[in-house]
Amino acid sequence: CQRAGIALVARRDTADVEPLVRSIATGFFAHAAVRTPDGTYRPLRSITVASAAAEAEAAVPLVLHPDSVLCDVRPEWVVYTELVLTTRAYMRDATAVTPQLLHAVAPHFFELRQSSEARAAAAPSSTRLQ
């Protein structure tokens, strides 16, 4: 930055990063994953990896790469640029996103669904289960 004459300023204004996150999500929406209760991530699009020994295909749980700054945060939804396959399937260059953003950038690929809790809360009180 110094050689280019650009001032490096730390800011906490999230509005500055929203266009960047939107751009990343637009380019990598097919690499979206959601966190599961066990802490791994499930891809929203099925990913299979052929086993070299058995040549069978199995669903692969994804984890954040240990060098990722998101390891401590563990966001619920992410997009990633690549998978590194070792003993585990590591997501590299992960970015935290929201389901609403994924739907906004790729409505042909994602459908927003209301959770059962939200549907119950929105239902008239006469039909709500107590």
Image: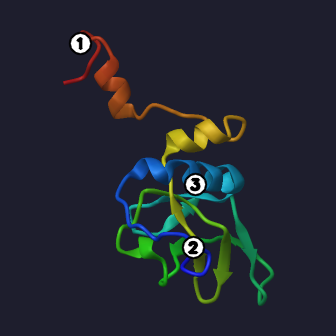
Along the viewing direction, whichever of 40 and 97 lies nearer the viewer = 97
Residue, disc 2: 5
Q: Is 50 left or right of 44, judged from the image as shown?
A: right
Disc 1 marks a residue whose amino acid type is: Ser
Residue, disc 3: 20
Along the viewing direction, whichever of 24 and 3 lies nearer the viewer = 3
Instruction: Where is residue 41? Give x, y as percent.
Output: 51, 65
Disc 3 marks a residue whose amino acid type is: Leu
* Label 3, label 1: how far apart the Cα atoms are: 42 Å
Q: Quadrant of the N terminus?
A: bottom right
Image quadrant in which you'd find residue 119: top left
Image quadrant in which you'd find residue 82: bottom right
Viewer-side label of 3, 1: 3
Along the viewing direction, whichever of 42 and 25 lies nearer the viewer = 25
Residue 125's disc number: 1
Question: Residue 87, relative to residue 114: is it above or below?
Answer: below
Instruction: Where is residue 13? Give x, y as percent.
Output: 37, 52
Q: Is residue 45 visible?
A: no
Whether label 2 touches label 3, CB < 8 Å? no
Q: Residues within 10 Å of mark 1 (few under 14, many from 20)?
A: few
Secondary structure type for disc 3: helix
Report the residue at 59% width, 89% height from top. 87
Instruction: Where is residue 47? Give x, y as percent.
Output: 70, 64
Report the residue at 54% width, 80% height from top. 2
Which residue is outermost to the front? Answer: 5
